[in-house]
Image (tube, helix red, strand yellow):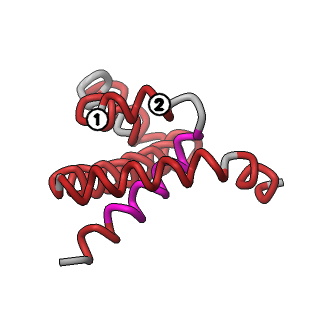
Amino acid sequence: MSKILKRKYRSKRGEFKNDLYQRCKDNKTLAVLIVQTYTSWHHRRHIMRIWSMMFWNPEYDAFRRDYNQNLMGKHLSGRDDIWRSLYFSERDLYEKFKYHIPETYAMGDAISVAYAVMKTK
């Protein structure tokens, strides 16, 4: 099934990578923004996995009670995906590809482009 999905988005993903590569080559800070977005995306996924494990496991009742009494509503929330970063930095790329490529594929393509640009001198 994933091969079918990858083939479905192949042409748009190639176009996205080429456009993004040209932008990152001209503006190295965009490559750094993509790497930072990727890092924060993984941190958020990691934290959400920890919280879901702690809330659903009956062995952590004390944690659940303590969290609900002391910390509920005092954590940061928001979006940290590649489309949000491109919305504020490269609006035309965002508008061109947002609804044509899934977020996870776009994140993988963007991080590969960012690493390729940062690797070249």
Q: Residue 36: horizontal and vertical position, in percent? A: 25, 53
What element does badge 2 sit on? helix
Q: Tag 2 or tag 1, which sits nearer the N-term?
A: 1
Task: Return the mark for residue 96.
Answer: 2
Above or below: residue 114 compared with residue 94: below
Residue name at image x 23 percent, y 35 percent = 89
Indicate left or right for 13 with 93 as reference: right
The CA distance from mark 1 to mark 2 is 10 Å
Q: Is disc 1 in contact with disc 2, using a CB cutoff of under 8 Å? A: no
Q: Residue 91: horizontal and vertical position, in percent? A: 31, 28
Q: Quick one: which residue is furthest to the top in this view?
A: 73
User: Viewer-proximal residue, 57 or 91?
Assistant: 91
User: Viewer-proximal residue, 91 or 85?
Assistant: 91
* Image quadrant in which you'd find residue 110: bottom left
Residue name at image x 50 percent, y 35 percent = 97
Q: Residues within 10 Å of mark 2 (few under 14, many from 20)?
A: few
Circle 1 residue = 90
In the image, is residue 65 part of the stretch drawn in magenta? no
